[in-house]
Structures are given as structure tokens and as C-alpha cells.
Amino acid sequence: PGRATAAQKKLAAELALKSEMLQKEEAGTSLHLAEMAQQSEEILASRGREEQLRQRVARLESELEEALAAARAKASAPEPEPVAEPAQKVSDYISTADDELDKCLEKEIMELGPGVLKGNKLERTGPKRYKIGDQKIFMQLSEGRVTVRVGGAYIPLQPWTKELTAAGEQGNDDPFSALDAQSPFAAVR
């Protein structure tokens, strides 16, 4: 009983070998099962992504249909009248110098409204000096307002602009010069 026989030793060796093989098979099976579980998870994730993509495609198709319907409705609806923006004030004169007189002149002409210079072009030739066509004009500030020299006195800008003649008009004193040449009264002088 204390000694193992050769047959027992052989049987113990075979059992150890089979046990080792079973452990290797078990490890391989575990590895194979882990790989299969990972593949299964990847398949499920892929199916989840496919479902998300299907839902997104359906949502985009719905949005596209709504946009097309809105575009068709807009195309058949009449255009609304554009809302007129408040007109910006435009000055007949734009300041070209950085002095107070020139800036006040631009501001006052803008306040008087478009067309106040009656198509004439007002140009600055120097400090306090301007011209319209060939006419030299002297201006200055008096109590913060622009005044224009007429004869030997300075008058406010507004009355001076009322006396301006339209661009291209000659100051003709002939009362008949305004008659149309085709008028039957044009020949009478």
C-alpha cells in the first residue's frame, strides 16, 4: 500500500495530462466565448446605430417635406409689400474740411432738405470761402449759425438759399424768356 505501482503511476500521469488538456480547452473555450460575446455586443451596437440612422433619415425626410410644402405655399402666396425704411437725410453739401463752419454748413443744409441748393454745386475754396459756379461766396458763423455775405452784410443761410437760382438758369430779366418757343405768344415782343 505505501508503494505505487507502475500502473498507478501511469494512470496518474495520464490523469494529469488529461487535466492539463481540459484546462487548456477550457481556457480556449473561455477565450472563444469572450470573442463571441464581444462580436455579439458589436452586432447589437451596429443594429442600434442602424436604427438611429433610420430614425434620423425619417426625421430629415419629414423636415424636407415640410420645407417643400412651405416653399410651395410661399411661391403661390403674393409677395408682401416691402416695409419702407425711414429715409435718411441727405445733404446737398458734404463737409470737406475739419473746421466748425464747414460742419455747421453741412448740418444746416441737411436740415433745410434736399434740393435746397437747386442743383447748384457748392464748393469750399478756403477758410470761410466757397463758390457756386463762378460766383464767390463768403460765409461765417454768427451765434453758432451760418451766415452768407450779400453785399456788405451777412444774412442767415435759409433766406440766402431761397434767393438762389436753379443750376443752369441765367438771371434773365426778360419776362418773356420763360415762354415756350412754340407758344403763339413767343413771337410777340
Image: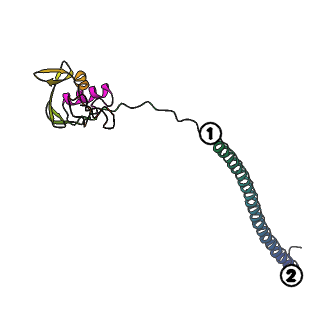
Which of disc 2 and disc 1 is earlier in sequence?
2
Residue 153 in percent (x, y) is at 12, 20
Magenta stretch?
A: 99-118
Q: Quadrant of the N terminus?
A: bottom right
Instruction: Between label 1 and label 2, give the one nearer the viewer.
Output: 1
Residue 34 in percent (x, y) is at 75, 63
**Residue 124 located left or right of residue 11:** left
Residue 9 in percent (x, y) is at 84, 78
Task: Name which residue lies at 67% across and 48% down.
Answer: 68
Q: Between 171 and 50, which is closer to the camera in this rendering?
A: 171
How far apart marks 1 and 2 lie (CA) works out to 108 Å
- Residue type at numbered disc 1: Pro
Main secondary structure along the magenta-highlighted residues? helix
Residue at the top extreme of this rendering: 143
Q: Is residue 27 above or below residue 79?
A: below
Determine which of the numbered discs, if any, sits on residue 6 in the image: 2
- Residue type at numbered disc 2: Ala
